[in-house]
Amino acid sequence: MIQKTKVKQAFNRKKIQINVDALNLIERRFSRMVDMWSDNAKNGNVKRVTAETVHLAFGDLERYIGS
């Protein structure tokens, strides 16, 4: 689901080495986050995620209930 090369490059730009096991863990965690976001969108009755509705997928409801 993620482009491991880009993740690796991001770490390498900071002079940090990252191994394959760590990349796999990052990929699994990102996949779980995307699953959670899609569940949030479905539970929020969002039919199409756009720039205006993505906060619902992220679970950021402060826009509606105040901070």
Image (tube, rainbow, N blue to C red):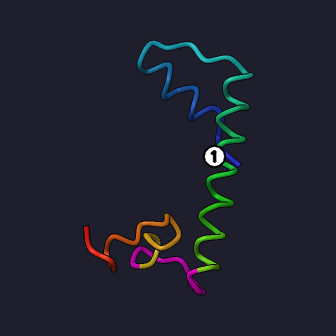
The secondary structure that most of the magenta stretch takes on is: loop
Which quarter of the rendered picture does the C terminus lie within?
bottom left
Q: Position of residue 19 (x, y in %)?
A: 68, 17
Q: What residue is at 69 percent from the left and 39 percent from the top?
A: 27
Residue 5, picture quadrant: top right
Identify which residue, 1 or 35, lies in the foreground.
35
Reading the image, the residue beneath label 1 is 30
Q: Position of residue 18 (x, y in %)?
A: 61, 18
Disc 1 packing (10 Å; few <14; some 14–19; many ≥20): some
Classify mark 1: helix, strand or loop: helix
Identify which residue, 52 or 60, lies in the foreground.
60
Magenta range: 44-52
Tell me, yes or no, whether the highlighted magenta stretch contains residue 49.
yes
Tell me, yes or no, whether the highlighted magenta stretch contains residue 13.
no
Taking 23 as reference, is 51 left or right?
Answer: left
Q: Position of residue 29 (x, y in %)?
A: 66, 42
Residue type, label 1: Phe
Residue farthest toward the left in the current orientation of the protein: 67
Residue 13, picture quadrant: top left
Q: What residue is at 69 percent from the left and 60 percent from the top?
A: 35
Taking 12 as reference, is 1 left or right?
Answer: right
Q: Position of residue 10 (x, y in %)?
A: 48, 29
Task: Judge whether 43 appears above or below 26 on screen.
Answer: below
